[in-house]
Image: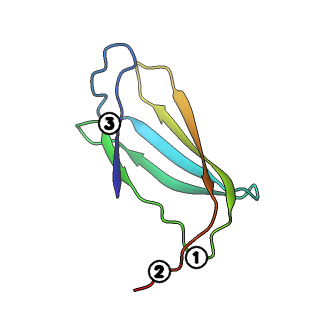
Amino acid sequence: MHYLRILDEKSNEVVPHAKLSMDLFYPSGHFERLVEDIANENGQFLYQWTADKGCETGEYTLTLRVSINGYEAKTESLKFKVTYIIQNLY
């Protein structure tokens, strides 16, 4: 599990209760909505994604969209690669 925190770009202060969505775009072009939620009073939200053994290899794009009244909506993306999956030995 991971926490992300929503911060004001200028003041670096927490932005509580922002609406957000997080999409994961697979190398094949398929996408999955991982999160559609509202950040808590500390501007945080929790998410998790685990690459399983059947996961596609290649470049993925994670896109986060955030909006709240009084702020311009913001979209950020992060790219990462999955090169291979090691089977769980447990």
Q: Indicate which label's residue lies in the foreground, 3 or 1.
A: 1
Mark 3 and mark 1: Cα distance apart in space: 35 Å
Q: Are marks 2 and 1 in contact (CB under 8 Å)?
A: yes
Q: Position of residue 52 (x, y in %)?
A: 54, 73
Q: Earlier in the sequence, mark 3 or mark 1?
A: 3
Q: Which residue is mark 3?
A: 17
Disc number placed over residue 38 in the picture, else none = none
Q: Secondary structure at mark 2?
A: loop
The amino acid pointed to by label 1 is Lys
Disc number placed over residue 53 in the picture, else none = 1
Q: Position of residue 55 (x, y in %)?
A: 63, 69
The amino acid pointed to by label 3 is His
Q: Secondary structure at mark 3?
A: loop
The amino acid pointed to by label 2 is Asn
Q: Residue furthest right?
A: 28
Q: Residues within 10 Å of mark 3 (few under 14, many from 20)?
A: some
Q: Position of residue 6 (x, y in %)?
A: 36, 33
Q: Is residue 42 left or right of residue 52?
A: left
Q: Which residue is mark 2?
A: 88
Mark 3 and mark 2: Cα distance apart in space: 37 Å
Q: Earlier in the sequence, mark 3 or mark 2?
A: 3
Q: Position of residue 90 (x, y in %)?
A: 39, 86
Mark 2 and mark 1: Cα distance apart in space: 8 Å
Q: Are marks 3 and 2 in contact (CB under 8 Å)?
A: no
The residue under the point 59% across, 52% down is 24
Q: Residues within 10 Å of mark 1 (few under 14, many from 20)?
A: few
The residue under the point 64% across, 61% down is 83
Residue placed most toward the observer, 7 or 73? 7
Q: Residue furthest top?
A: 10
Residue placed most toward the observer, 65 or 81? 81
